[in-house]
Structure formats: C-alpha cells, structure tokens
Amino acid sequence: MEFSTKAGGPEKHKTGCVAVGVFEQQRATEALKALDRPAKGYLSSILRRGDLSGKLGSTLWLHNVPGVAAERVLLVGLGKEPDFGPKAFRETVRAAVRAINDSGTSDAILYFAEVPVSDHDAAWNGLQLVQVAGEASYRFDRLKSDKDGRPRRVKFAAGFLGNPSPSVVRALQRGTALAQGVSLAKDLGNLPSNICTPTYLATQAQQLAKQHKLSCRVLDEKDMRKLGMGALLAVTKAAHEPAKLIVLEYRGGPSKQKPVALIGKGITFDTGGISLKPSGEMDEMKYDMSGAGSVLGTFKAIAQMRLQVNVVGIIPSCENMPGGHATKPGDIVTSMSGQTVEILNTDAEGRLILCDALTYAERFDPSTVVDIATLTGACVIALGGVASGLYANDDRLAAELFEAGQQAWDRAWHMPLWDDYQEQIKSPFADMANIGGRPAGSVTAACFLSRYARKFKWAHLDVAGTAWLSGKDKGSTGRPVPLLTTFLMRRADRT
C-alpha cells in the first residue's frame, strides 16, 4: 500500500477522491466545511435533506461537486461527536478505505487525521490512519488462480488543512512500517501448512535479515539435541518436517544496551499429537504459528522504523503430529533447563517448545523477555477475541505492555500469576506436569512457563483468541504486532 501526505484545502487537490467526515445531526468537520465553502453550500444542503445521517461508518458518494477539483467526494459518518474515541476513529477509516477500494478510483486523500479523538493527539491519529488503511486494504489471494478479480491498488494520502508537524509526519512513517509488519504476519498466518513449514519460516527470517541487515541463525534438530532441548524435541518426534530454532538479532540501540527478547511459538500445524484434536475446524491449526509470525512482523516494522533499541527474536518451530514415534501421554522429558516434565496431554505442546526457548534466551542476558503464543483455548473462553491474555512476573513490565496495547488499540488484559495456581501442575513423577486440569487453564499454562523465566523480567501473551478470525472473515489478524511494535517504540523513544 502506498501512502503519502497532502497539505492544503481538500477542494484544491486534483485526485480521484477526497474523503471527509460528518458527525450525526449534520455536525461538519473542518475539512467538510473547507469543501463546502467553494461548493457554495452544496454539501450542507445534501446533509440537510437527510441523504447521510452521520451514523458511524455510513458512507455517501458525491460526483462532480461544484468548486471541488476532486472527481469524487466521499462523506463518511463519524457517529456522535461526544463519543468519537479510538474505536470510532478506526471504524471511520476502515469504512472509508473499504468504500474507496470498491470504487473505480486509483487515488484518494483521507481528511481524518485532524479530527479530534478523545485522549489522543494528532500523531496517534496519523499512525492509526495509515495502519487501519493498511489493514482494510489487505487481501490474501496469492494462491488463487483467478487474478482478474483482484481489486486495484489505490494510492492513499493523509490530508491536512495546514502543514503537518514533524511528530505527525514521523507517526505516518511509523504507521506505514507497522502496516507492512502486520501484513507480513498475516501472510505467514494465512499460508497453508504445506507451504508454511518450519523450514519456510526459517527462510523468511533469513530473507528478512538480508533485506534489513539483521543477524540470523537457524539451529536444526542436531543443534537442539546438543543443547539438551528435550521438551521441544518431544513435540516434533513424529513429524516428517524438521524442526528449526530461528534466532534473529536487531541492533539499533547502544552496544551496551541489553536486548529485549521476543519469543514466538511457531507450531506450523498442530494436530494435537496422540491427544488428537477434533476434526472440526482443525484447518485453523495452521494459525498455531501466529506467535512466530508476530515476531517476524515486529522485526520488519522496527527495522523499517530504525528504532534505537536492541531486540532478539527466538522462534522455536515444528509440527505436532501423531505417529509411531510420537510422544505419548505419561512420557517424561528433560528440558534444556534440566527440569523434568510429565507430558499428560500432547496437545499442550506450545509450552514445551517455549520453555526450551526461554532457557535459550538466557545466553543473551536480556533486559526483558516477552513470549507470544496461541497457547490455550481457555484464554479464548476467558477473554474472547477482544483482548490477549497478559501474564508477567514483574508488575511494571505488565503495566508497560498493557499501556502499549491501549495506545496501539491492540489490547491485552493483565491476568493473575499467583503461586496458588502452581499447585495444579504438580506431578508425582516429575518436576511438573504440562497441564493443570480444566480450571484456569490459561493461568496454569503461564505458571508452567514462569518456571523457566526466573532469571529475567518476563511476560507472556496468550493470543489464542486474537491472532485470527473464524467464520466468513476467516484470516489472520496480525496481532499482536501493533502491541509489540508500540512497546518497543515507547522504549526507544525514552532512550
């Protein structure tokens, strides 16, 4: 998606479309007023006739508006002015971009960045404008044979009545980078598992590293055996696709600055193993690598932003398959940390690959570690598809991630990680079991991981409910790339 900036009155631009907003009760924005003056009240007369109520997300196309250089004017309803907050702003942009993409125009200027949003500044508006436009324009059709049905690529611009400030220009640039990072995560998630294998993920990481001059190392199963990663290798035992441990390094900060480590679960397909999943909707288990995709998407975004921060990405990736060599319920394995695990359910495999990755992260002496995983169905029951589950062994880190999610509108909710829950994963035969029963399933999964994160500040994001959508809009959401990128942006801006 192409995105630029245009300064000056919306009536002056020779473009395929100018999009402006209107609140309910015919409350015009400044951009709409600027259009209406040379049009000698043409727009306001249409509103008075009730052709557009101003209801949030409603749209009305106007052609050949008098006194306006643009071929078309798109009026977009903003809803009630007192209620115009982040959600309404995003819905406005999404409605406008979808209408424009379905039209015949090849370019459009969106005059929404200067509409006041409660508790947010113009820079937030600018970043969100570009990001949401990118999301609304996203299509995944690379595997379709009919290419003629593709919508045309529209060149978008953010319109400003005056010259945008440097902070707004930077926000627009960051929004473009973030949108591209989200698109990468979506592409990886939407690919089928016969294409997006652990080897494919490793190749994508290597290409990303080459493109942005990052460091990339890929460990194979022989390397993992030498490291003693018994938990990760237990998951991949029956898979024909070889497991990979992908390690990326972005060095944008001072050389002595300790890195932030991002660990992404990369199960490229999860059958459940011997604890086989039900067949219904099993195709969606291709999204079980969404944590890995979010790490790669975040690296793409921060590299394009050139953030002054050091980040390490660790992606344990494999398939979880049944078979004669598969790990069985009741088997006991030794993790890289030396702790033993009784595997009571082979479908609780994500924590097994993450625990070895957490131990591996120690060698980088990180300031902070955040793991991202589509870990538990229990988190979907608890929080649905709105918020990701947020766990941490440090309250300040939890608050930092929570605030980043609020700013990015990629929200997470702080969940308990109390010692009381550790009782549920006790095992009579090993140091711990890999499940703790049905009650508080997302919490006990986080408790399991916490036993491997005692040497650093750590947080866990359970994105099982937020990483993809089911139903008619099935597809990857790219979350939590916005949250992670905003978290790193805020850290970089403080240095």
Image (cartoon, rainbow, N blue to C red):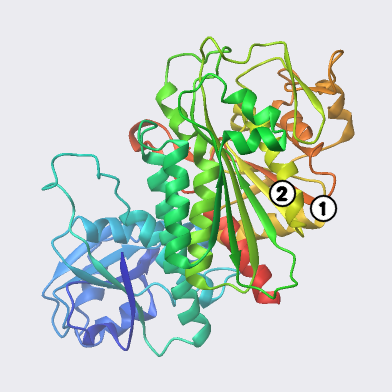
Q: Residues within 10 Å of mark 2 (few under 14, many from 20)?
A: many
Residue 245 in the image: x percent, y percent? 58, 42
In this rendered view, identify the residue nearer to me: 103 or 4.
4
Residue at the image point whose x is 53% and y is 82% from the top: 167
- Distance between mark 1 and mark 2 Cα atoms: 21 Å
Q: Secondary structure at mark 1?
A: helix
Residue 272 in the image: x percent, y percent? 55, 19
In this rendered view, identify the residue nearer to me: 450 or 23.
450
Mark 1 in CB contact with mark 2 (< 8 angstroms): no
Residue 89 visible? The answer is no
Q: Earlier in the sequence, mark 1 or mark 2?
A: 2
Number of marks in the rendered image: 2
Q: Which residue is mark 2?
A: 361
Q: Which mark is residue 395?
A: 1
User: Mark 2: which amino acid?
Assistant: Ala
Quadrant containing the N terminus is bottom left
Residue 327: image quadrant is top right
Mark toward the viewer: 1 or 2:
2
Residue 201 visible? The answer is yes
In this rendered view, identify the residue nearer to me: 376 or 296.
296
193 vs 359, left or right, is: left
Q: Is residue 291 above or below residue 425?
A: below
Q: Is residue 471 above or below residue 80?
A: above
Residue 308 in the image: x percent, y percent? 62, 74
Q: Which mark is residue 429?
A: none
Residue at the image point whose x is 49% and y is 31% from the top: 242
Q: Is residue 265 above or below residue 237?
A: below
Residue 436: image quadrant is top right
Residue at the image point whose x is 62% and y is 31% from the top: 350
Q: Residues within 10 Å of mark 1 (few under 14, many from 20)?
A: some
Quadrant containing the C terminus is bottom right
User: Mark 1: which amino acid?
Assistant: Asp
